[in-house]
Image: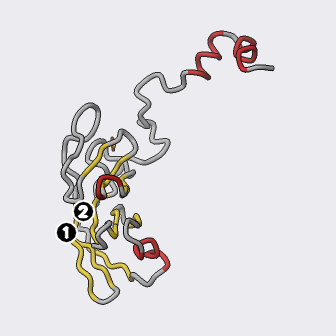
Amino acid sequence: MERKQFLKSLGAGAAFAITFPCLGSCSKDNGENGNIVEEPTNVDFTIDLNSAEAANLATNGGFIRINLVVVVRNLEGELIAASQVCSHQGYDEVRFASQNGGIFYCDVHGSQFAQDGSNLNPGNGRATKPLKVYQTELNGDILRVFE
Ligand code: FES
């Protein structure tokens, strides 16, 4: 059975539901791909860069998400950190992307942030506030992430 015949056999309502599941804003406001959480406070933790959980930090552009913080080895090899909780609607979906020299990105509504947390594409249904960034300090192989 071809697609057109299949949709016709389902009736107009079902065909509409199948072909236009994202007619609204296509946002993930139902939390399907993330959770709305509070931005972390009093951040102060360490990561052993030799540990398995830090393996992604061995490569420029690699990142891990830990304690609601995105810890990154940026494209220049510097270790930086920012909130995993987006400043837009609080989804825990912020990650690092290597595009445009390296940015923080939230895929829920497409907010982009520079490495200093400033907004790169504010408004139009995206974040208008900056993303919280944290300090980092490297002592040997131990990385401290703190406010
Ligand atoms: S919650 Fe991140 S862009 Fe909307």
Residue under the image location 69 percent in, 10 percent down: 11
The label shown at residue 41 is 2
The label shown at residue 147 is 1
115 or 10: nearer the viewer: 115
Of all residues shown, which one is farthest toward the bottom?
140
Tell me the SS state at disc 1: loop
**Within-10-Å neighbours for mark 1: few <14, some 14–19, many 20+:** few
Image height check: is 55 above or below 129? below
The amino acid type found where label 2 is placed reads Thr
Q: Look at the image and tell me in which quarter the N terminus lies.
A: top right
Quarter where residue 49 is shown: bottom left
Any atom of ligand 1 within 8 Å of the CB at mark 2? no
The amino acid type found where label 1 is placed reads Glu
Q: Look at the image and tell me in which quarter the C terminus lies.
A: bottom left
User: Residue 90 at what x, y percent from top left?
Assistant: 32, 46
Which numbered disc flags the more N-terminal residue, 2 or 1? 2
Image height check: is 112 above or below 71? above
Image height check: is 122 above or below 131? above
Look at the numbered discs 2 and 1 and tell me whether their residues touch, using CB distance below 8 Å. yes
Q: CA distance from mark 2 to mark 1?
A: 8 Å
Tell me the SS state at disc 2: loop
Task: Determine whether, in the image, residue 96 is placed left or right of residue 132.
Answer: right
User: Residue 50 at what x, y percent from top left?
Assistant: 43, 84
60 or 67: nearer the viewer: 60
